[in-house]
Image (cartoon, coloured by chain):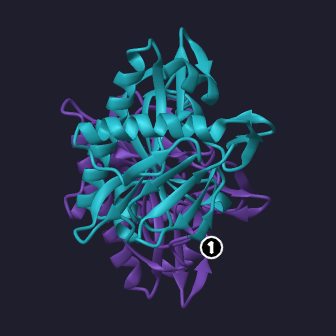
Chain colours: A cyan, B purple
């Protein structure tokens, strides 16, 4: 088992059978000790955050599997805080795909002239580049195509998958009276046919969830939901 | 004649016949005394900049008219540095539409992980909101539609017009050995049928033009070109 990548919230190991093992850590992104799913830095370490994230991820990836939505998920070991996944190649040097149901965060910072805080958005999808040095800039369909990161065909597929998956998560959370404001995904290409699949995780650290108008912290979300 | 708007580089007056008069000023955008077409502040005042901008604008708007490309232009008075135009309503609180042939400026600042300085771009179009407080954020086709600024149909038309107009300017400049790197336009809706037309100006202050690899200052461009 070979460490191939040390990430902000998880480490990645290559397995002998060609699959990968993700080790979930107790670090979450944020700035100055405050959690922020949009941040590029590890903001704080929360005891049990890794396992809590994995429990949610396991739940959602298995739900997606039942619905026939493709992901890289194989299985998970909650005790060890590890998840086994199929190999996947990211788009370019990595993209984040955001689906928004409410105007908060960077959407509001950019489009505050036209949107009010918390205003409903219709499963709005946007893509940002993973690029810490340039603060994860948003990028358009045309630019993704022109720079050879994602074809127009792939973009359509990605947008469609993003809305499908976000809607699954939104519906699941709604069953417990939780509102999903926005959620961030990563995708990759897998297999011979370069199928686009959801990768990484679906946990409190990737989304903004609210209950009765109050923001739910990532660790709280796992307790409240599972 | 009523002053209706005091802009950074021109003032706008309403005429009695319902048309508008644009008074070109000698102020150009930039920061700390250095010209920058992407800047939101008046960087410097250059004697004759208003007339030089108008001369180029008159030339290009008349060229577009000959080619049947719609603009708000009626006529121009170089001596007075004024241009008469049809009334037009802007999209939302104003958009800028950029067409890029080379990776420079904000494109490079955002996508430098995937593009090299000066790399050719294939008449790449992007839209930014005119919003000084939020540093003119880029906005996608989907967001423009969702926020009620521009319909999908209008976006397609806008992109098509942008590439057509930019190509006209590029070809005209190329006749004098000048390379167009990028250019910024404004559009509006005019008349009963809300036709999309080019508004504002086409001058050195809206574009980055180079000769033999050397950047040409806006005032220099007018002398070199006309």
Q: How many numbered tags mark residues here?
A: 1
Is residue B19 shown to the viewer in this render? Answer: no
Residue extending farthest to the front is: A79
Q: Of helix, strand and loop, which one carries label 1? A: loop
Q: Which residue is nearer to you in this view: A87 or B141?
A: A87
Alpha-carbon neighbours of circle 1 within 10 Å: few (<14), some, or many (≥20)?
some
Residue linked to disc 1 = B217
Location of the N terminus of chain A by quadrant is bottom right
Q: Residue at x 31, y 70 (%)?
A: B168
Instruction: Using the image, name the chain to which the residue with label 1 belongs.
Output: B
Vertical relation: B181 (above or below) B43: below
Q: Residue at x 48, y 74 (%)?
A: B181
Q: Position of residue B13 (x, y in %)?
A: 50, 34
Residue A118 horizontal side relative to residue A132, left or right: left
Q: Position of residue B37 (x, y in %)?
A: 59, 60
Residue A10 horizontal side relative to residue B171, left or right: right
Residue extending farthest to the top is: A212
Q: Position of residue B18 (x, y in %)?
A: 35, 29
Q: Position of residue A101 (x, y in %)?
A: 42, 27
Q: Which residue is nearer to you in this view: B49 or A146?
A: A146
Q: Residue at x 49, y 23 (%)?
A: A226
Residue extending farthest to the bottom is: B212
Q: Which residue is nearer to you in this view: B164 or A48?
A: A48
Q: Which residue is nearer to you in this view: A147 or A58?
A: A58
Q: Residue at x 45, y 68 (%)?
A: A92
Is residue B50 shown to the viewer in this render? Answer: yes
Vertical relation: B15 (above or below) B171: above
Vertical relation: A48 (above or below) B128: above
């Amino acid at each position: 088992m070979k460490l191939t990548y040390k990430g902000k919230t998880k480490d990645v190991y290559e397995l002998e059978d060609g699959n990968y093992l993700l080790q979930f850590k107790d670090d979450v992104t944020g700035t100055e000790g405050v959690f922020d799913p949009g941040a590029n830095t590890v903001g704080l370490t929360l005891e049990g955050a890794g396992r809590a994230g994995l429990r949610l991820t396991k739940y959602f990836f298995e739900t997606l599997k039942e619905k026939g939505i493709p992901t890289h998920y194989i299985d998970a070991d909650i005790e060890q805080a590890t998840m086994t996944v199929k190999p996947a190649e990211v788009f370019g040097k990595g993209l984040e795909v955001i689906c928004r149901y409410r105007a908060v965060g960077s959407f509001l910072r950019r489009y505050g002239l036209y949107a009010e805080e918390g205003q409903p958005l219709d499963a709005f999808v946007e893509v940002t580049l993973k690029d810490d040095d340039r603060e994860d800039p948003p990028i358009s369909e045309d630019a993704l195509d022109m720079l050879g990161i994602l074809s127009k065909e792939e973009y359509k597929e990605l947008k469609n998958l993003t809305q499908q998956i976000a809607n699954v998560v939104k519906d699941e959370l709604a069953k417990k009276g939780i509102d999903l404001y926005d959620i961030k995904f990563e995708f990759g290409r897998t297999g011979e046919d370069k199928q686009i699949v959801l990768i990484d995780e679906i946990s409190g650290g990737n989304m903004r969830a609210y209950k009765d108008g109050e923001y739910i912290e990532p660790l709280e979300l796992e307790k409240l939901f599972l």
